[in-house]
Structure formats: structure tokens, C-alpha cells
């Protein structure tokens, strides 16, 4: 690569011209340049090493620069990086579909491969609507979901996100209006109470004639608040969907591929959705790819009526490079002791994070599988606490009041201990500063 920018000023240029997620362009918060990454270590341009607590947003489950994933990418690269999927196909896509079908709940056996999590949510919503249309029901075009959810940033997906954290008022005129039930409060089946589902039940009973699908994140609500809820809620949602002719879309983009302790979070409730979205960890964090799985009944129904096709088709649909890496990543996962690794993480979180519950300024500590969350009473000062983490040699990216980790599955116990010690130290410092 020839260099247009010189070594001393490229970062100033970047700061002036390149957007970052959910951040102002002008006067942006500090950003740390990464030179390379290996295993669970990010190496900054200035030579400092950080233990990664984020898996680059749930995705890098096998760590960075993994030899198996690297060679899968290189082998596929030498064959073809990409080819259009309209009228053409390739082995990596078929292999990926076979893997996804064998791992996900049984009725899911039709696969749509697309570019990102948000797009997979768009696809899932369109599938549900087209299904009811094909059955001659044009009235079912809205969604029912629960507050505090997160389903992505494109307009269709955003319309199903929590209305407040999703800033619906800013996009008022373009977002469709969906039905929102209160977020579940019972965190497990032991403290389940039937009133938890009452609001949801009222909405589905009153409006099922307009509702194509329920969409929700099973068991763990991720970017909308890092909240966990009882499997019983999900079982009751499934039963209510069946009783009222409403499809169930499970957004497993964050929870899929083992993070919660089961391969997919739906398994914790023993239910199968009608449509499932997968993304994030699907390629082990190597490149962007997502998948939508559905049942044969839904795909047959859509295909049997005009326009005799599902109306979606991204340019980079089923990108072979991404599919090849996804296949290698899934094989790595399935062949690894991932359950033990997740259990080890959960134990370390319980040991290291639970004591924070008694700290003044800490509202809650939540642990599930490879997810550890410390919720504070007040939002953190982002640049200050981030500096605190980096100075302590770890990479943790809080949002609002939530300081949380979801490390790569391959993290060693030593690294995990160092990560959590740095996390709690920096939180203590942040709380002390008020
Ligand atoms: C991240 C996420 C998405 C959006 O995925 P992108 O790849 O960022 O578009 C959707 N749903 C859930 C549950 C997610 O965590």
C-alpha cells in the first residue's frame, strides 16, 4: 500500500474526516489506533498491549489472527473472493447452510445469507410480511416486540429497537409504528410471575390481526441494556404466537454461537422460532456476514404465490470469502471445549464481579455465560474511564451506565483475572471520582 498520509499526521486526518459509531464527527472522543492483534491481545500503534474484553462486539470468539481462520480466508481468496449469487452458487455457501441447519433448532432448514445483522433483521421482517401476504392476509404487516431491545441500525430494524434508546422521535416520519410490550422483569424461572407476560398478552390478543411477527432477542437483551430474562417468558411468547397466528423471529445475532452457555439462547427455553437471525460471531469476527433461517413451510408459502420469489437480494449475498471463514469458525467452535470455556468465564465473573454488588454507586451485577455486566447508578464519563482501562492494559467499552465484558472464548484464566481486576479497579476509580 502506498501511503498518502505521513506517519506523524494520519491520525489527525482520521480524526478530522472519519466517522465512528454513535459518536460526533466534530471534536470526537479519543480513539486508540490498533496496529495488530493476536489471540486476546490488541497492540496499539504506540506498542501498548490491551487484553480484549469485548470480542469486537461479540464477534471475535476465537481471538484475533487465528491460523485456522487465516488459512480458510487465504485458500478461498486464491479461488475467488466473490461472485454474484444471482444465478450462480458455490460450495462455501452450501457448506455453511448445512452447518447452520444442523446446529439450529430442527424446523429451521431454509437459509438466506446476507451482509450484516441489521440486514438480516430487514430480511426476517420482510419474510414474515411476505408469508402472510402469500397466505392472502394483507392485514398482517406490523411487529410486536419488547422494550429495551436492539435489532440494528437500518430503518426497518431500528423501528423494532427500544423507542427511547433507539431515538425513534428523530426519525418519526420514516419509521413504521410497531407494538411494544414492557420488557420482562423476571431474570430466571425461579422468580417468574405471570404478571410479567400480561402486557405482552394484552397486545397480542388485541392486535394479532395486524401483527405479522413478534421479534425479540431470546434470553439476553444486548445493546438495549444488557438485560437477561426468564426462559419461561420465551416459552409463553412462543405459545401466544401459536395461539394467535403470529410468527416468532428470534434475533440471535448477539446470543448465537455459544455466548450464553448454550449454542443458541432459544435452547434455554426449549423453543424454536419460525425465523432466526444470526450474525456477529458467525465468521469469528473476520468479516461481515449474517444468515436468516426459516422453516420449509414459510419458504414454500412465499415461493408458491406471486411474485414467486422472496423480494430481497444484496450485491454481496453469500460472499464466498465470508462463507469460507464462517465454515472454518463454526468447525473450530464445535470442535472446541466451548461449554467449559464459557463456564470458566461465568465462574470468574461470579468471583470477581459479584462483590461489586455491594459497592456504593453500583446498581446491579449480572452474569450469564460469557457475559459479565456491572450496571452503575449513573452513566460513566466515557473518555475518562476508557483511559483508565487502557492505562491498566485492557480494552472495555462501556455504554451509559453499563460496564460489561464478553471476552473471546480462548481467553486464559490468567488473562481473565487480569481483565476483571482492571475492570473493577477502573470502575472503583470512576465511582470514587463521582
Ligand atoms: C449487533 C446486533 C444487530 C445488528 O447487527 P449489525 O451487524 O451491527 O448490523 C442486530 N441485533 C442484535 C441482537 C445485535 O446484537
Image (spheres, rainbow, N blue to C red):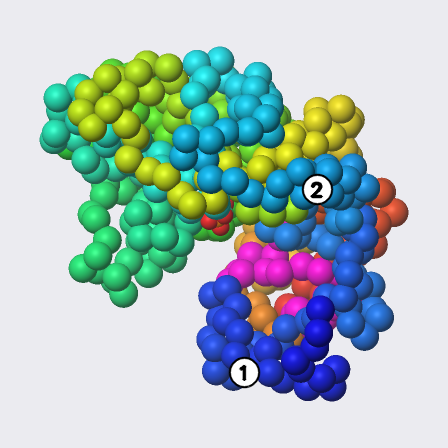
* Quadrant location of the N terminus in the rendered image: bottom right
- Residue behind mark 2: 78
Magenta-tinted stretch: 385-405
Query: Front-most of 386 and 21?
Result: 21
Q: Does residue 433 appear in the picture of this structure?
A: no
Q: Label 1 crowding class (10 Å Cα cut-off): few <14, some 14-19, many 20+?
A: few
Query: Front-most of 134 and 318?
Result: 318
Q: Is residue 116 above or below residue 278?
A: below
* Quadrant location of the C terminus in the rendered image: bottom right
Query: How far, Cα to Cα, is label 2 from label 1?
Result: 37 Å
Residue drawn at (55%, 29%), measured in percent from left and top?
Answer: 90
Q: Is residue 325 magenta?
A: no
* Lateral position of residue 41 relative to residue 199, left or right: right
Q: Is residue 321 above or below residue 44?
A: above
* Lateral position of residue 235 relative to residue 354, left or right: left
Measuring from the top left, give residue 137's x and y in whole percent: 13, 24
Among the two numbered marks 2 and 1 on one chain, the one whose residue lies closer to the N terminus = 1
Labelled disc at residue 271: none
Query: Front-most of 112 and 430?
Result: 112
Q: Does residue 93 appear in the picture of this structure?
A: yes
In which quarter of the view is residue 330 placed?
top right
- Residue behind mark 1: 16
Q: Secondary structure at mark 1?
A: helix
Residue that protrudes farthest toward the right in the picture: 414
Amino acid at each position: 500500500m502506498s501511503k498518502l498520509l505521513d506517519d506523524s499526521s494520519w491520525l489527525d486526518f482520521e480524526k478530522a474526516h472519519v466517522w465512528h459509531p454513535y459518536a460526533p464527527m466534530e471534536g470526537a472522543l479519543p480513539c486508540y489506533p490498533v496496529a495488530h492483534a493476536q489471540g486476546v491481545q490488541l497492540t496499539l500503534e504506540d506498542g501498548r498491549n490491551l487484553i480484549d474484553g469485548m470480542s469486537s462486539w461479540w464477534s471475535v470468539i476465537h481471538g484475533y489472527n487465528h491460523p485456522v481462520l487465516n488459512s480458510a480466508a487465504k485458500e478461498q481468496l486464491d479461488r475467488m473472493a466473490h461472485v454474484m449469487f444471482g444465478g450462480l452458487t458455490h460450495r462455501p455457501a452450501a457448506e455453511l447452510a448445512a452447518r447452520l441447519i444442523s446446529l439450529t433448532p430442527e424446523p429451521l432448514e431454509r437459509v438466506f445469507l446476507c451482509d450484516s445483522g441489521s440486514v438480516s433483521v430487514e430480511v426476517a421482517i420482510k419474510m414474515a410480511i411476505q408469508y402472510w401476504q402469500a397466505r392472502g392476509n394483507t392485514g398482517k404487516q406490523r411487529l410486536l416486540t419488547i422494550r429495551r431491545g436492539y435489532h440494528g441500525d437500518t430503518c426497518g430494524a431500528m423501528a423494532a429497537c427500544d423507542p427511547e434508546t433507539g431515538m425513534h422521535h428523530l426519525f418519526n416520519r420514516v419509521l413504521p409504528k410497531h407494538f411494544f410490550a414492557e420488557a420482562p422483569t423476571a431474570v430466571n424461572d425461579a422468580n417468574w410471575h405471570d404478571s410479567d407476560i400480561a402486557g405482552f398478552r394484552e397486545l397480542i390478543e388485541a392486535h394479532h390481526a395486524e401483527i405479522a411477527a413478534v421479534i425479540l432477542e431470546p434470553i439476553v437483551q444486548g445493546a438495549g441494556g444488557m438485560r437477561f430474562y426468564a426462559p419461561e417468558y420465551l416459552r409463553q411468547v412462543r405459545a401466544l404466537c401459536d395461539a394467535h397466528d403470529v410468527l416468532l423471529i428470534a434475533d440471535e445475532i448477539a446470543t448465537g454461537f455459544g455466548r450464553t452457555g448454550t449454542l443458541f439462547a432459544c435452547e434455554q427455553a426449549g423453543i424454536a422460532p419460525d425465523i432466526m437471525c444470526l450474525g456477529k460471531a458467525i465468521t469469528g469476527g473476520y468479516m461481515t456476514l449474517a444468515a436468516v433461517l426459516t422453516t420449509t413451510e414459510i419458504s414454500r408459502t412465499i415461493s408458491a404465490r406471486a411474485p414467486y420469489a422472496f423480494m430481497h437480494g444484496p450485491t454481496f449475498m453469500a460472499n464466498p470469502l465470508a462463507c469460507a471463514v464462517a465454515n472454518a469458525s463454526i468447525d473450530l467452535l464445535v470442535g472446541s471445549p466451548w461449554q467449559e470455556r464459557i463456564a470458566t468465564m461465568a465462574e470468574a465473573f461470579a468471583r470477581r464481579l459479584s462483590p461489586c454488588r455491594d459497592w456504593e454507586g453500583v446498581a446491579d451485577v449480572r452474569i450469564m455465560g460469557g457475559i459479565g455486566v456491572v450496571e452503575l447508578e449513573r452513566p460513566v464519563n466515557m473518555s475518562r474511564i476508557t483511559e483508565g482501562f487502557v492505562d491498566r492494559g485492557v480494552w472495555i467499552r462501556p455504554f451509559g451506565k453499563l460496564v460489561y465484558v464478553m471476552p473471546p472464548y480462548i481467553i486464559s484464566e490468567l488473562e481473565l483475572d487480569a481483565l476483571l481486576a482492571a475492570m473493577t479497579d477502573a470502575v472503583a476509580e470512576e465511582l470514587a471520582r463521582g
